[in-house]
Amino acid sequence: MRGTTAQQDLIRGIWRENPVLVQMLGLCPALAVTNSVENSLAMGIATFFVLCCSSVLVAALKRFIPHEVRISTYILIIATFVTVADMTLEAVRPDVHKALGAFIALIVVNCMILGRQEAFASKRPIGRALLDAAGTGTGFMIALVMMGGVREVLGAGTFLGVSIFGPSYEPWVVMILPPGGFLTLGIWLLGLSWWQKRRAGDGDAAPTDAIQGGGA
Amino acid sequence: MSGAPPSGTSAPGTPPPGTGAPAAAPPVLEEPHVPAWRLFSTLGAGGALAGLLLVFVFQLTQPAIQAHKELMLQQAVNEVLGAPERYDTLYLVDGALTPELPDGVDERTLDRVYHGFAADGVPVGFAISASRPGFQDVIRLIFGYDAATGRLLGMRVLESKETPGLGDKIEKDAAFTGQFAGCEPPLVGVKGGAGSAPNEIDTITGATISSVTVLRAINDAVAHWRPALDAYAREHAR
């Protein structure tokens, strides 16, 4: 972690330490709202916004936040931005807001965001915190769209609402139901780890320096 | 480090308040001496600022949110009444319908129906909203009802979280929603295209609970509103 360049801070979260596909963080929204590309994008954008704003604020205020109440303060900051995002989305895109339901409010407990505050923003300068948040937020969005794309194409026969296979396609409804989320995530993880092994030659893979975490 | 409560930035002498301290903290896990009032004031000030920000954003976004809700309602009323020329809002006050609000009563606390009129001033019917717990969550819907003939004019779901692909057909499948116009409550659900009587509705395969909830919500609402609607119609017939 120490001694990374600005570029590394930005790039890292997008793919090599992708929050969903590598760190396994933020799985709850990744499973729950990715039943269409539009919902995935909206969730990704809302999370991106909350993550960037919180990281900047936490990095800016880190000297004033006593160690004992840091987590409560981070949550307070995150919750504020989540509420802002919630109200803004309802005003701007009410239909998407309706589709995402309670999951916007649940960004507060997305441990990917709290994790970035505790592990990065609270120790680094503001600029770096913003880069890291932007990278991680983008990575989260990419992972969500990867899931949403597969699920919408198979489960509804459309991509971003545009029909792909024509009217004779019989949608796999299971893909847009909760089990489809687990299936899609599992298949993506399987494929990516297979690809990574193959790319690294015979098993001597350079270990990703990602922190393996768990949680919703 | 003993008696040093003075507000001081340097007083605690432990890592955080130091200087810029990029390389500070992590390994040192000794008890930092932070007075309780600082903890309280941090959270208190943070909460107050957050509250202020939210009030600000709320006031910015509220008009748009409210306008959208009204627009949706308007569209729904127009749809279930078959695009009437205009409609009035009637409030239920002491068991009777009245277009005027009594003094000092908050409009939002009153039950209401919408009374639609065709171009020549002929009343078309009432738009009534109803809700009932469905399979996942409460289903809210609105339907048009012609009190004179006792028939429905149309139905539209306003809010539902039913299973995508199955239960959500109650709002998306025109084959289901299209059946309501001309039906005569109390409605009865039947399976697979057997419905022919004016009170029979074909339920959706795989979404029986969602479909039946819609029927029951309408039946209950009709039973609930019927007396008031009849009284209103009698009064205005004279």
Image (cartoon, helix red, strand yellow):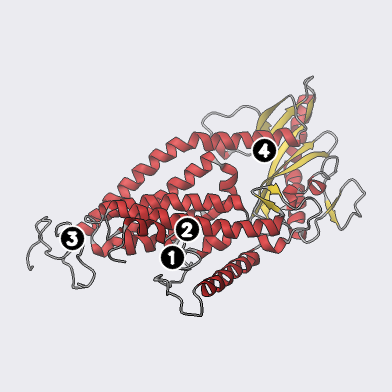
Q: Give amino acid for label 1.
A: Glu
Q: CA distance from mark 1 to mark 3?
A: 27 Å
Q: Which element is circle 1 on?
A: loop
| Residue marked by disc 1 | A17
Please say if the residues under marks 2 and 4 sit with CB atoms less than 8 Å apart.
Answer: no
| Residue marked by disc 2 | A139
| Mark 3 vs mark 2: in front | 2
Q: Which element is circle 2 on?
A: helix
Q: If you read the primary sequence from the N terminus, does the residue marked by circle 1 or circle 2 appear first?
A: 1
Please say if the residues under marks 4 and 1 sit with CB atoms less than 8 Å apart.
Answer: no
Q: CA distance from mark 4 to mark 1?
A: 64 Å
Q: How many residues crowd mark 3 within 10 Å: few (<14), some (14–19), many (20+)? A: few
Is disc 4 in the same subunit as disc 1? no
Report the side of B8 relative to A169 (left or right). Answer: left
* Marked residue chain, label 2: A
| Residue B54 visible in rendering | yes
Q: If you read the primary sequence from the N terminus, does the residue marked by circle 3 or circle 4 appear first?
A: 3
Please say if the residues under marks 1 and 3 sit with CB atoms less than 8 Å apart.
Answer: no
Is disc 3 in the same subunit as disc 4? yes
| Residue marked by disc 4 | B95
Q: Give amino acid for label 2.
A: Gly
| Residue marked by disc 3 | B21
Q: CA distance from mark 3 to mark 2?
A: 30 Å
